[in-house]
């Protein structure tokens, strides 16, 4: 009833998983991904405990094969299960129980496992493997390419409904809410794979806009955000962020004036962005907003005591 992929990016160390099914909310209780540990997909009359159990084993040093074998041994219903596992060290394993609905099968190689059941064709899981290994781009991009290939090869013979793509950083920061690189989900859609592609593209564009490269000029950062289809508010933030990093008050004023011409309320956003009020001589909002993104900004009072504990990242909500 489902096809999925778990993978590790050999270059960045990021871990990810993706799934699509004719089952509603297929991304819930099927994918588990933990930075520095591994990724698990559990499907086909899914037992959600496979995720936490396999991650626990990986966390204590087990290979993907050992973690999966231990999980299936304690499950008397394992013939109905299908599971894929990849570890942060690149080991991979998959299992397809004998009671899974045909067509059902899996493939795994170092850093990747693909699995599918109730498919229209036995070509689905090999197509996923080939597409992922031949795709370019980020880990999220390649995971979607695998889903697209699965659907093109026939997919679930019942049709499509739901899916999810999730990617986390290579190592844990100790603040799990900050470790997601991409996490998008579709629960009821006539073409969920196409919708997941759109959401992944937007997620990555937003991430770039709210944490732009300081190697860009402010205009380049703002133009890149617009070119990615983002709204003017995100383009303004991208440009203002780079302007602050570079200390370019003229560029910051130009970007802000353009935004204010569209809506005067952008001034209230600008006053809250770290460094913008100081750079442009605006009245700041106190207390100053800190810890909301990764781009370094020098500002008065940074690092002072008084704001304690881990901070969330509103730029990624």
Image (spheres, grey):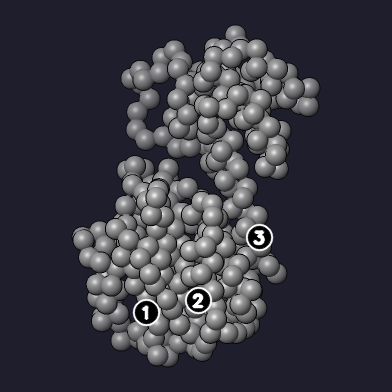
Question: Is 169 situated above or below 196?
Answer: above
Q: Quadrant of residue 162?
A: bottom right
Residue that appears at 54% across and 67% down: 131
The residue nearer to you, when weighing 307 against 71, is 71
At mark 1, the secondary structure is: strand
Say whether disc 3 or disc 2 marks the residue closer to the N-terminus.
2
Residue that appears at 39% across and 86% down: 97
Residue 61 x %, y %:
21, 61
What mark, if any, has residue 95 been given in the picture? Answer: 1
Residue 128 x %, y %:
52, 71
Residue 224 x %, y %:
65, 35
Nearest to viewer (mark 3 / mark 2): 2
- Give how far apart the Cα atoms at labels 2 and 1 are: 15 Å
Q: Quadrant of residue 141?
A: bottom right
What mark, if any, has residue 195 been given in the picture? Answer: 3
Say whether disc 3 or disc 1 marks the residue closer to the N-terminus.
1
Residue that appears at 69% across and 20% down: 256
What mark, if any, has residue 114 been given in the picture? Answer: none
At mark 2, the secondary structure is: helix
Q: For this view, does 259 lie left or right of residue 137? A: right
The residue nearer to you, when weighing 35 against 12, is 12
- Give how far apart the Cα atoms at labels 3 and 2 are: 23 Å
């Amino acid at each position: 009833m489902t096809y999925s992929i778990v993978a590790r990016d050999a270059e960045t160390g990021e871990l990810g998983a993706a799934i699509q099914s004719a089952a509603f909310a297929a991304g819930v209780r099927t994918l588990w991904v933990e930075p520095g540990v591994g990724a698990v997909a559990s499907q086909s009359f899914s037992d959600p405990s496979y995720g936490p159990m396999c991650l626990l084993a990986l966390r204590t040093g087990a290979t993907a094969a050992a973690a999966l074998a231990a999980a299936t041994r304690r499950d008397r219903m394992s013939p109905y299960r299908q599971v894929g596992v990849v570890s942060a060290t690149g080991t991979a394993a998959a299992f397809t129980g004998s009671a899974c609905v045909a067509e059902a099968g899996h493939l795994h190689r170092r850093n990747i496992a693909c699995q599918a059941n109730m498919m229209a064709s036995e070509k689905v899981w090999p197509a996923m493997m080939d597409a992922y290994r031949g795709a370019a781009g980020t880990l999220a991009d390649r995971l979607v390419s695998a889903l697209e290939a699965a659907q093109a090869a026939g997919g679930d013979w019942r049709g499509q409904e739901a899916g999810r793509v999730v990617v986390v950083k290579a190592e844990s920061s100790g603040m799990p809410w900050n470790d997601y690189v991409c996490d998008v989900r579709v629960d009821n859609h006539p073409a969920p794979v196409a919708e997941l592609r759109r959401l992944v593209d937007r997620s990555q564009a937003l991430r770039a806009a709210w944490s732009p490269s300081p190697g860009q000029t402010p205009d380049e950062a703002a133009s890149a955000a617009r070119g990615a289809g983002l709204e003017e508010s995100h383009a303004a933030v991208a440009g203002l962020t780079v302007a602050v990093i570079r200390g370019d008050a003229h560029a910051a004023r130009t970007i802000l004036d353009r935004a204010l011409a569209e809506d005067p309320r952008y001034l209230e956003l600008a006053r809250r962005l770290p460094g913008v009020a100081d750079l442009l001589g605006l009245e700041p909002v106190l207390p100053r907003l800190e810890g909301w993104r990764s781009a370094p900004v020098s500002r008065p009072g940074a690092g002072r005591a008084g704001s304690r504990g881990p901070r969330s990242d509103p730029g990624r909500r």
